[in-house]
């Protein structure tokens, strides 16, 4: 489960949509994966309806925690792009009734596109 008290996830880098194959059984009719970002073992997928975070657990990695965060529960969000010396970008999401969640991305991630997607879904 995502720790909303801590509010941070390891740095994510863009991955192919094939990386999100294991969440396909969770998707509803008409829902599609838009983008996927991977950490060491964990990953986050942005779909047309929600954000799905996958926390791989245990030594073998067979145990996984899937956390679904619908765009409709986001109250506010913040996008911070990378700079010259600070190559990482950040996405902060404030969920109604849950609190703040922060994702950190490597410099090559298209954080502006993620912000646009979230904006389209919540505005």
Image (cartoon, rainbow, N blue to C red):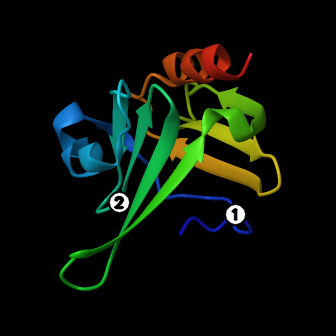
Name the side, left or right, on which 58 lies relative to 65: left
Residue drawn at (72%, 40%) of the image = 73
Name of the residue lying farthest toward the front = 29
Residue 5, image x, y percentages: 74, 68
Neighbour class for label 2 at 10 Å: few (<14), some, many (≥20)?
some
* Residue 10 in sight from this viewpoint: yes
From the top left corner, tell me how far across and down residue 112 is, in percent: 55, 17
Does dot 2 land on a helix, a strand or a loop? loop
Q: Which residue is mark 2?
A: 42
Residue under the point 23% across and 32% down? 17
- Taking depth in this image into account, of 84 and 106 the one nearest to the observer is 106
Is residue 16 visible to the viewer in this orientation of the structure?
no
Query: Residue 55 or 47: which is nearer the viewer?
Result: 47
Q: Is residue 117 above or below residue 7?
A: above
Which residue is rendered at x = 23% and y = 75% of the image? 61
* Identity of the residue drawn at 70% across and 23% down: 122
Q: For mark 1, what is the residue?
A: 4
């Amino acid at each position: 489960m995502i720790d909303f008290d801590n509010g941070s996830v390891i740095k994510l880098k863009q991955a192919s949509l094939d990386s999100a194959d294991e969440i396909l059984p969770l998707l509803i009719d008409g829902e599609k994966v838009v983008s996927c970002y991977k950490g060491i073992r964990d990953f986050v997928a942005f779909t047309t309806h929600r954000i799905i975070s996958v926390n791989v657990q245990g030594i073998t990695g067979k145990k996984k925690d899937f956390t679904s965060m619908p765009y409709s529960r986001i109250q506010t969000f913040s996008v911070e792009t990378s700079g010259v010396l600070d190559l990482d970008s950040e996405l902060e999401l404030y969920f109604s009734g849950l609190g703040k969640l922060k994702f950190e991305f490597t410099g090559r991630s298209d954080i502006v596109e993620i912000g646009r997607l979230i904006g389209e879904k919540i505005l």
